[in-house]
Image (cartoon, rainbow, N blue to C red):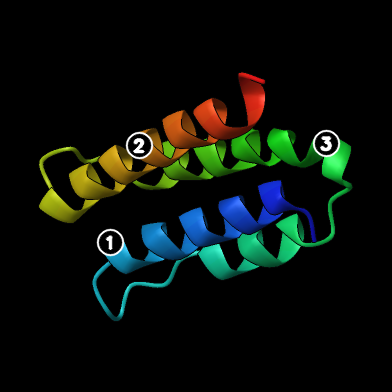
Amino acid sequence: MCEETQFIARSLDRFQACVPPGIETRFHYLKQQCFHMAPEIAHTHWIKIHAYLSNTFQDADVEWQDQLCDAYHEEYINYLKKFKQQ
């Protein structure tokens, strides 16, 4: 597993931590998928994550969903800084 997929996996763990207990998500599935991606296309996994988040968690009036969106934004910006501005 490359460093990029490890970063994405840790990000998915952070996203899961934003969700209250008892609410099922697909973060574990997305995490498993990223482990099977070739390193040169790992960055494309963010597209799937964004699609999942924007289609599933759309209520900014729910505090934890707002925190989840903020966490996604922070993680994605950090990913770009670390891996794509080289």
Graded by Cα atoms within 10 Å as few (under 14), some (14 to 19) or many (20 or more), the crowding at tag 3 reads few
Of circles 1 and 3, the one toward us is 3
Residues marked 1 and 3 touching at CB (< 8 Å):
no
| SS label for mark 2 | helix
User: Reading the chain from its start, which is encountered first: label 2 or label 1?
Assistant: 1
Type of amino acid at the residue the image marks with label 1:
Cys
User: Reading the chain from its start, which is encountered first: label 3 or label 2?
Assistant: 3
> Mark 1 to mark 3: distance in Å?
27 Å
> Mark 3 to mark 2: distance in Å?
21 Å
Q: Which mark is residue 55?
A: none
Residue 12 visible to an observer of this rendering: yes
Q: Label 2 belongs to which residue?
A: 74
Q: Label 1 belongs to which residue?
A: 18
The residue lying furthest to the bottom in this view is 22
Q: Which residue is located at x 44 percent, y 43 percent?
A: 53
Q: Which residue is located at x 61 percent, y 19 percent?
A: 85
Quarter occupied by the C terminus: top right
Q: Which mark is residue 41?
A: 3
User: Picture coordinates of residue 84 (x, y %)?
Assistant: 64, 24
The residue lying furthest to the front in this view is 86
Type of amino acid at the residue the image marks with label 2:
Glu
Q: Which residue is located at x 48 percent, y 54 percent?
A: 11
User: Picture coordinates of residue 19 (x, y %)?
Assistant: 29, 65
Q: Is residue 41 left or right of residue 74?
A: right
Quarter occupied by the N terminus: bottom right
Residue 58 visible to an observer of this rendering: no
